[in-house]
Image: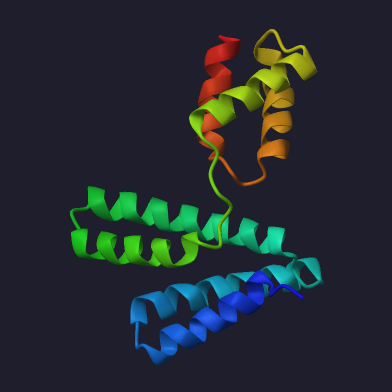
Amino acid sequence: MATTLKAQLREEITSALRSSDKVRLGALRMLSAAVTNREKEVLHELSDDEVREVAGKEVKKHAESIEAFEKAGRHELADKERAEREAVSGYAPTQLTEEQVDALIDEAFAETGASGPGDFGAVMGAVMGRARGQVDGTTVQRKVKERLG
């Protein structure tokens, strides 16, 4: 039986603990806590895809923190956030390329027959449903708005 992402996460936490890598350990423990919290919300053990979804949200939080710390001139905190993001990014879904995002948007337009600003929600729903955490929603939102005029 292949190991689950949760089991892999537990092993990596143990490894980080043994190697005294405090930043990595902290980031992995935060991810583990986020997974546990999500399981309590949905009342079942998370699948690997659901664990990836939680990890994707954690990566996004780190990215937002990095941006905020950079703006505030707190480079040492931004560096710490980068290290933490790196530690959890292996569990997040791989991000789609610009071309893949454009292709998904094209498919959504063809599928929904979108032609004006009123079709924005339908296109966004179709794209984000297929992308499943593999693309930042603000990027898709910007591209769809440009296409709809």
Residue extending farthest to the bottom is: 18
User: Residue 76: x and y, percent?
Assistant: 20, 65
Question: Which residue lies at the image location 39% right of the left edge and 75% below the top edge?
Answer: 24
For residue 56, above or below residue 132: below
Q: Quadrant of residue 134?
A: top right
For residue 23, above or below residue 90: below
Q: Quadrant of residue 119?
A: top right
**Nearer to me, 145 or 127:** 127
User: Residue 95: x and y, percent?
Assistant: 53, 44
- Residue 50 shown left or right of residue 78 in the figure: right
User: Residue 26: x and y, percent?
Assistant: 42, 78
For residue 71, above or below residue 86: above
Residue extending farthest to the right is: 43
Quarter of the rendering occupied by the N terminus: bottom right
- Residue 48 shown left or right of residue 135 in the figure: right
Question: Which residue lies at the image location 33% right of the left edge and 60% below the top edge?
Answer: 82
User: Residue 30: x and y, percent?
Assistant: 51, 74
Disc tally is 0
Image colouring: rainbow
Question: Which residue lies at the image location 62% right of the left edge and 47% below the top edge?
Answer: 133
Q: Quadrant of residue 111?
A: top right
Quarter of the rendering occupied by the C terminus: top right
